[in-house]
Amino acid sequence: MIIKKQALWLEYMYKYNFKKRILYLMVGILVFLIFFTIGTSVSFEKSISELLKEQFQNKIKNIDNIGIFANNFLISILMFIPGIGIVFGLFSGFSTGNIFMIITQDLPIQIPPLLVFLTIFGMMELISYGIAISRSYLLLIHILKRTNIKEHLIHTGIEIGIVAIILFFSAIIEWNLIKQSGGVDFVQ
């Protein structure tokens, strides 16, 4: 019985095209980064910038690693929705770029926007969002083609679990770095 289950699992994994999946992941990451970069190039009037900065500060005022995880995981879950998740992912990248620009515009030195994704937690979040955006696309394609959606829902469940694990450890790392740098007061 165990051997039969292992054989089924191997057959199932053989059908899963990892090379193609990595390609979709890279495209998901790329479009997120493009919209993040576009978001950093949009400027607002001083009053709107101050309002958005204040709203962001209020949102993260009492945040900790669990709050960071919950926020990032909720965002990623929405990105898994077939089709709509792509749009939400692009909006998330754009708005993240906006907030990054607003927070860093008054610093004495200008931080290159994409530098945040060279941190370990930035890379982990980027991979998670790339997984979610690309799975949204794949689900949409398979729904439109009316193919065996059950198999793709299994893949989606596995990927949601992978994203949860990545984002959990990412939140711990990010929170520890925030604590070491003096807490969330850095945005004031």
Image: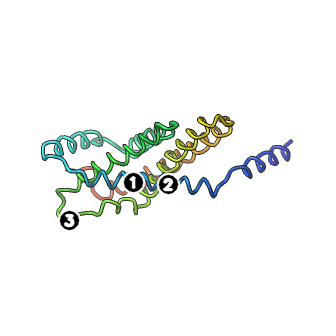
Q: Is residue 169 left or right of residue 94?
A: right
Of callouts 1 and 2, which one flags the residue occurring earlier in the amino acid sequence? 2
Q: Cα distance, mark 3 to mark 2?
A: 31 Å
Mark number displayed over residue 21: none
Q: Are marks 3 and 2 in contact (CB under 8 Å)?
A: no
Q: Which residue is mark 2?
A: 27
Q: Secondary structure at mark 3?
A: loop
Q: Secondary structure at mark 2?
A: helix
Type of the residue with mark 1: Glu
Q: Is residue 129 left or right of residue 14?
A: left
Q: Which residue is mark 1?
A: 174
Q: Secondary structure at mark 1?
A: helix
Name the spot of residue 74 as percent of width and height, x first.
44, 38
Name the spot of residue 35 as percent of width and height, x first.
36, 51
* Image color mode: rainbow
Q: Is residue 91 left or right of residue 103?
A: right
Residue depicted at 55% across the width and 38% down the height: 140
Q: Which residue is mark 3?
A: 109
